[in-house]
Image (cartoon, helix red, strand yellow):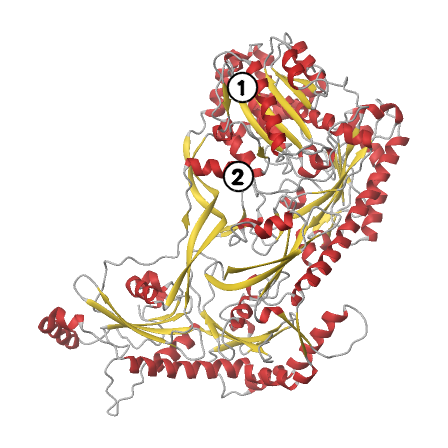
Amino acid sequence: MAGPGSPRRASRGASALLAAALLYAALGDVVRSEQQIPLSVVKLWASAFGGEIKSIAAKYSGSQLLQKKYKEYEKDVAIEEIDGLQLVKKLAKNMEEMFHKKSEAVRRLVEAAEEAHLKHEFDADLQYEYFNAVLINERDKDGNFLELGKEFILAPNDHFNNLPVNISLSDVQVPTNMYNKDPAIVNGVYWSESLNKVFVDNFDRDPSLIWQYFGSAKGFFRQYPGIKWEPDENGVIAFDCRNRKWYIQAATSPKDVVILVDVSGSMKGLRLTIAKQTVSSILDTLGDDDFFNIIAYNEELHYVEPCLNGTLVQADRTNKEHFREHLDKLFAKGIGMLDIALNEAFNILSDFNHTGQGSICSQAIMLITDGAVDTYDTIFAKYNWPDRKVRIFTYLIGREAAFADNLKWMACANKGFFTQISTLADVQENVMEYLHVLSRPKVIDQEHDVVWTEAYIDSTLPQAQKLTDDQGPVLMTTVAMPVFSKQNETRSKGILLGVVGTDVPVKELLKTIPKYKLGIHGYAFAITNNGYILTHPELRLLYEEGKKRRKPNYSSVDLSEVEWEDRDDVLRNAMVNRKTGKFSMEVKKTVDKGKRVLVMTNDYYYTDIKGTPFSLGVALSRGHGKYFFRGNVTIEEGDKELIQEVLFDAVVSAPIEAYWTSLALNKSENSDKGVEVAFLGTRTGLSRINLFVGAEQLTNQDFLKAGDKENIFNADHFPLWYRRAAEQIPGSFVYSIPFSTGPVNKSNVVTASTSIQLLDERKSPVVAAVGIQMKLEFFQRKFWTASRQCASLDGKCSISCDDETVNCYLIDNNGFILVSEDYTQTGDFFGEIEGAVMNKLLTMGSFKRITLYDYQAMCRANKESSDGAHGLLDPYNAFLSAVKWIMTELVLFLVEFNLCSWWHSDMTAKAQKLKQTLEPCDTEYPAFVSERTIKETTGNIACEDCSKSFVIQQIPSSNLFMVVVDSSCLCESVAPITMAPIEIRYNESLKCERLKAQKIRRRPESCHGFHPEENARECGGAPSLQAQTVLLLLPLLLMLFSR
């Protein structure tokens, strides 16, 4: 296919082809191997095209006018080197103040909640009509509001992403598996109504606050502003505030946990399924400050992950998911030898504690079994008494009560808790009990520790579900504090009432960072005490596949995964340890959807953010990025510095508007409308845009619009065209074809931009960048016109891009094709089309390959999917399964073992099939950069039966190269060079090393593991399935069997 303006024409005469064929037949391979391309001719073409395209770019962008205007103001300008340490300390102080305001709002909620509870007397018969978040505004068939579903006024609000909310009132969500009118819930809802006025007052004091809430220990969730909650397709709301990261972190202290699971023969069938679900629910309650391991036991010990024999691992999301996958492999057989398991668990906890790596706070053994024949007091006497530093939590699986006394004694004798779990529906509520026990010391101490969570996305909340695709997931951190009962008579019981919190979107942090002070490539970032990223421009929450989608199970990303050049974690560890200092290294930053790379040296400055577990860092790139340019324009009040600099830029750049207008009005200029847009950006983020064609005629409608995030000024980066122009030699233009996000990368415009620098000896801060966008067809036509020129007096050229024997290309400094005789190759990587030539250019040093790593990638994987098994590890699928099971049991009165075959076949026969999924993975991929010092090169490539020659010539004042290649020698033995990422696969021993590797982390400063006044007699009992639970299940039963 011939490209626009291409000199080659398919309709050449048959006689010409015949002559060529005869010539080839006569001369044979010898001539083919000696095809030479004259460098002088290619140089002439490159010079002609370079001069023409630069004059167009300079004229329409107004670059020379702008350079001149800044020059005129040189005497009013001060150039200062940025003091990175002073800058990072000032930014940290700003963030500290912002975080403090949020924690004060939460403190006011705590005081109000504790006061309201103190004044309230429990009333078992209390009737109270509250606003239930699921039922509000719902009517029955007669048009009357449902009970607990009164009218609740909702209106879209800009501050809350335009969601319909009520900013005067909160409403209450109750988990699906709980009874709306349970007296404990009704009483809690009643006294917590007093939080409404505090919610509103907090919002008035600090209008940047978003969601505020109270998560009750009884399970209900009061949220402000009030919003409507919608159940999923199963009629379920999969949200329980008590297993949220912010709740658990505020309610308990960090802990080391060993989970023991009985896999003896008696655990077969449903019991083992309930046990697995119990383990999974316990894992849900563990956070990044906790450590754990899981051991299955019968007459032998079976570590669920054999690689982690004898140690504990951090309970981050990745590790928890890894263990969940291994739970599927457990099966029941043999005899249960609990004494061996208990000995192992105590030894692990003791050894791990001595390494200093764990939580160094609470320790616990979770025992999940269908019975214990002994109380094992000799083991507890040996390891745990009299201090009882390791709490024992026992979960009796099944209905038999024969062994309940032994298990309850073990829990009570070791400051733990005993529960009996008979059905899958019981699991979640019973697992939660242990959190109340672990919260006791903190409650008795009345220590209201402020906690800040890692960055996370809670996709089960209605505000997350109702966001549209273009708004994307909101990454946030939560500040939370526990709420305690202050009633004297319950002090030794240490009753936790719940947790209050407010969300802080991470983008809120960026508002405190003045981007204009960080330079073109500079950025700020923050990490947690565990080294996980709170905010960083390289953090990706989405993967793209046609349309942006959230990564499944977004998990915390460690700083070492984005600043991967720091192989020894020097920067990461200094920040985790809350040091203040500086660190430097060469970095490779990818831009333009990861296809291009900028190699630079960064200086990192860092310090801690007081009052939080976070540390802040600032990266400044060496060279022009280290200098700050201060204009001299006086103003009155406001954010003086920024307004002053923007005003200065506005004054200096104002004449360019008139210049662009005069060009647009001159009809003889740009008559073919090849140049469509001119644009300007300054270091303060001031932008100016001029259209040379009507908006509806623009070839690229998205350019410089809000959705074109890489090309506009953002909170965390300068536009791509600005950043790339800054890396070019002053006075030259950088040309590129924008990469599309679609599967086929075809663009029909070319962008050209250049930087405006103030030259002051060696200091040359970039003060602005200007550019144009033109039609690709216009740009390519200029190239083909230039390539028709030749210097011979008789006008007969020795070579031409018309010739069948050569292919002509225009490529950029990263090897992407802007012009090719085959138009479909536009935007492709040159190495994929001319692998032999690209390979030679790499060998000769004209281009260099840079290896990059992506530790946040998503790879396709074939996974054996068992819908039943995985479904059961979701609490609510498990819950629905339990409904079915209970119904069958009520009808048939059969024992668990007989039911098992019906139940199991129904749940797991669905899908033993291979399913393609996207899994997090690590990848390695190349990027290519031209060597600036090489202006021209000729080369020959020895192929199987011929020699392939080529010439590469730099286009003056640009980042472009003309490449002319001998097409008569195919050289097919050399494979194309691809930029496709390759998954890094780890062998089993390396996988094991990675699992065991414990990066340096800083544990939270407060620990409330024990309290001498603690009432350990509150240690559980054997609950029966209450009537109200059965009543609660009836609507779900009807729904299930009506399917």
The x, y position of residue 188, in whole percent, is 81, 30
Residue at (48, 28) in percent of width and height: 306
Crowd tier of the residue under label 1, counting other residues whose Cα lies within 10 Å: few below 14, some 14–19, many 20 or above: many
Q: Residue 291, can we see it?
A: yes
Give the camera-side residue of 762 and 230.
762
Res 416 quadrant in image: top right
| Viewer-closest of 83 and 166 | 83
Q: Tell me the amino acid under the disc marked 2.
A: Ala
Secondary structure beneath disc 1? helix
> Which residue corresponds to mark 1?
272
Q: Residues within 10 Å of mark 2 (few under 14, many from 20)?
A: few
Local SS, label 2: loop
Q: Is residue 253 above or below residue 680?
A: above
The amino acid type, in three-letter code, at marker 1 is Leu
Image height of 127 relative to 837, above or below: above
The disc at residue 501 is none
Residue 812 is situated, as x and y percent measured from the top left of the image, at 41, 70
Q: Hey, which residue is sitting farthest bottom in the picture?
A: 793
Viewer-proximal residue among 892 and 597: 597
- Give the residue pinned by disc 2: 997
Q: Residue at x 53, y 15 (%)?
A: 267
Task: Residue at 22% x, 64% y: name it.
Answer: 970
